[in-house]
Amino acid sequence: MELWFTEKHTPYVQFSIKIEKQLYAGKSEFQRIDILESREFGRILTLDGYLMLTEKDEFIYHEMITHVPMSVLPHAHRVLIIGGGDGGTAREILRYKTVESIDLVDIDEMVADACRRYIPQTAASLDDPRVKCHFEDGLKYIRHYENEYDLIIVDSTDPFGPGEGLFTKEFYGNCYKALKDDGIMVNQHESPFYPADSYAMQRAHKRIFASFPISRIYQAHIPTYPSGHWLFGFASKKYHPIIDARWQEWKKLAIKTRYYNPKLHAGAFALPTYVEDIVREVE
Amino acid sequence: MKELTQENAPVLEALEKLKQMRIVPFDVPGHKRGRGNKILTDFLGEKCLSVDVNSMKPLDNLCHPVSVIRDAEDLAAKAFGAEHAFFMVGGTTSSVQAMILTVCKRGDKIILPRNVHRSVINAMILCGAVPVYINPQMDKMLGISLGMGIADVKKAILENPDAKAVFVNNPTYYGICSNLKEIIKTAHAGNMFVLADEAHGTHFYFSDKLPTAAMRAGADMAAVSLHKSGGSLTQSSMLFINDKISEGYVRQIINLTQTTSGSYLLMASLDISRRNLALSGRKVIDSVIDLVEYARGEINNIGDYYAYSREKINGDSIYDFDITKLSVYTRSIGLAGIEVYDLLRDEYDIQTEFGDLANLLAYVSIGDRPRDMERLVSALSEIRRIYKKDSSGMLEAEYISPKVVLPPQDAFYTDREEAVLLDESVGRICTEFVMCYPPGIPILAPGELVTAQVLEYIHYAMEKGCQMTGPEDMKLKHLNVMAEK
């Protein structure tokens, strides 16, 4: 039997993975949730038919969204993750012993429950005593905090659907308010390649740039995301992502990574010219 | 034949039947089910164009309804508790004008609050009626006109026993209601009709948590904007009458100005919306109330902003309040409502209904999702954090009592008219409208005296970004006034 998962990366481009079996299908108040088993990528989480993570390449995304800001703030105590119900981002942050608590705010508890059951590789972190899960709208949660967090990681879905509110100016402004004076916000920043993704990415940058004094973009190669070329945003009140990185301190922590390293960290901020052009246009 | 129930939608059913019949169209409209205008069809969709048809035997005729439109109007009348309903395709403006043209002839007086929609005064220009304005009380802090006080209505009736009707906003744009039952009782005792502008009151008919609906309270006619809270297409509306008004005469009045090519898209949307409201209106309105109550609480927790509600009720000029209205007082952050309105749209991609000098109105309906409400609340919180400033020096709104010198028709159609510079118009009789838009309520109407207070208000509102609509000179450098002898 031929069973394939297919995601349309654009109306004219599709990406398919051969599926061994479907492990879970559910429908929450917000979205459809599926967990699939594949030979090439291991277990796969999809939301409304969009691939969120695979066991094989999730390390790239989760390392890059966490270790880049953490090597600038290796002594962060209070971390907020918005989205990230699969637990991958929390897992990486938990590797820093100085982090006292992680608030994880995801709108959809069913995603977390499904991952706990089928993708413990990422979701085991959700049951760590330092992680406190809040299942509510991230935009609503953040509004009530001021000068509270060292680091906010916006680990959202795409800006169409339930994640829409996490790409808005009001959200970024509220994040700014919730951060301490030297706080950093890092966000999943879409892809620069296909036009629809690129437009979303440019709009997000425009809004973040307007909300934070320092706003830079960095990149990673993620095989299962549209075009494979993915971006992250680094927005900060005080620290520059490269000049203020504390490599020596970070190396002393002896955190073993598979994708991230200090050299790559510095290089990741060097963008292709066409991406620079998209970014500059709104600065 | 089976008796129709609220489950039916006769116009919709007739259009669906028509589609199946595959009739060859040698009649208007010329786009012939969209085939003749491909770009339009691609834009609006084939389904839409295929029912953009003209009146014909199986579809009845809006000018003289005897079959499916008649049935649909009967169902609407039952659903809203009226003797008869008219489907209207010229907006609630056409419904309001039909009410006034029905009860007033040239020279007849009509008692009304000043904060009426421009369509009311337009109707008076058409028929030559003479306004007797009641000062709607003002809320000094919010800077908005309220409802009519009962004592004021009684006094106006006593002083003008020859008036033909009392006109009531139920509710105002801001959701404020007058004591409608008492006004109706008093007006009827004086042999006057009661006309209700329910442009913002469709939902009143389908909930017991909201103010009284006019037809249920005994009003003689009501103009109801189904396209606002009722969910039908823009420009569709309904007019209701009770048994004291002649249906045939009202239809003659409507047909004086109404198109003979009534849109079936609009009529079908009225029919479907009536069915929705009748079958599930209560549930839908409950969910809107919950969403607005939640938002009000959250907005009031931000600080400075004031999202007001039933606590403003004072037993007279605010006899009742529509809790589905989300009006927010913004002057406390040093910004006019229209400034917050502009920031929401330009900086946060959020479009609200309107901002005036002190308030913002967000229109909430069945189509809104909780996560959109979170965006609105969060954006308001951000606007306060980033833009808040000292609120002193902002103009205290005051009711500007209109000085009616001539009937609107006489002034509008005068042949002794001249244009003078706006700033030199004090003391002259205006012959045109000046409205602050939104909300589209007249500052000056034809036949009224221009005062220094009026000019100060116009300048302040323009400076804050309000649009002044109505005058012949769209930039309002000049104003048309009666020529001096």
Image (tube, rainbow, N blue to C red):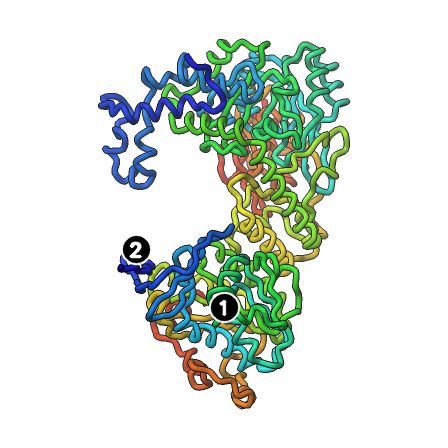
Q: Position of residue B304 (x, y in %)?
A: 70, 52
Going 47% across and 67% down the picture, which residue do you hit? A119
Identify the mark nearer the N-term, 1 or 2.
2
Q: Are dots 1 and 2 on a single chain?
A: yes
Going 38% across and 59% down the picture, which residue do you hit? A22
Q: Identify which residue, A89 or A36, lies in the foreground.
A: A36
**Depicted B113 relative to depicted A11: above or below:** above
Going 70% across and 54% down the picture, which residue do you hit? B303
Within-10-Å neighbours for mark 2: few <14, some 14–19, many 20+: few
Q: Residue furthest front?
A: A1
Q: Is residue A108 left or right of residue B217?
A: left
From the image, tell me which residue sits under label 2.
A11
Q: Is residue B319 left or right of residue B325?
A: right
Q: Secondary structure at mark 2?
A: loop
Amino acid type of the residue tagged 1 in the rendering: Asn
**Depicted A85 relative to depicted B36: above or below:** below
**Depicted B100 relative to depicted B340: above or below:** above
Q: Position of residue B121 (x, y in %)?
A: 57, 24
Measured Cα–Cα span from mark 1 to mark 2: 26 Å
Amino acid type of the residue tagged 2 in the rendering: Pro
Q: Which of the chains bears the disc numbered 2?
A: A
Q: Which of the chains bears the disc numbered 1?
A: A
Going 66% across and 51% down the picture, which residue do you hit? B298
Q: Position of residue B474 (x, y in %)?
A: 49, 37
Q: Secondary structure at mark 1?
A: strand
From the image, tell me which residue sits under label 1.
A187
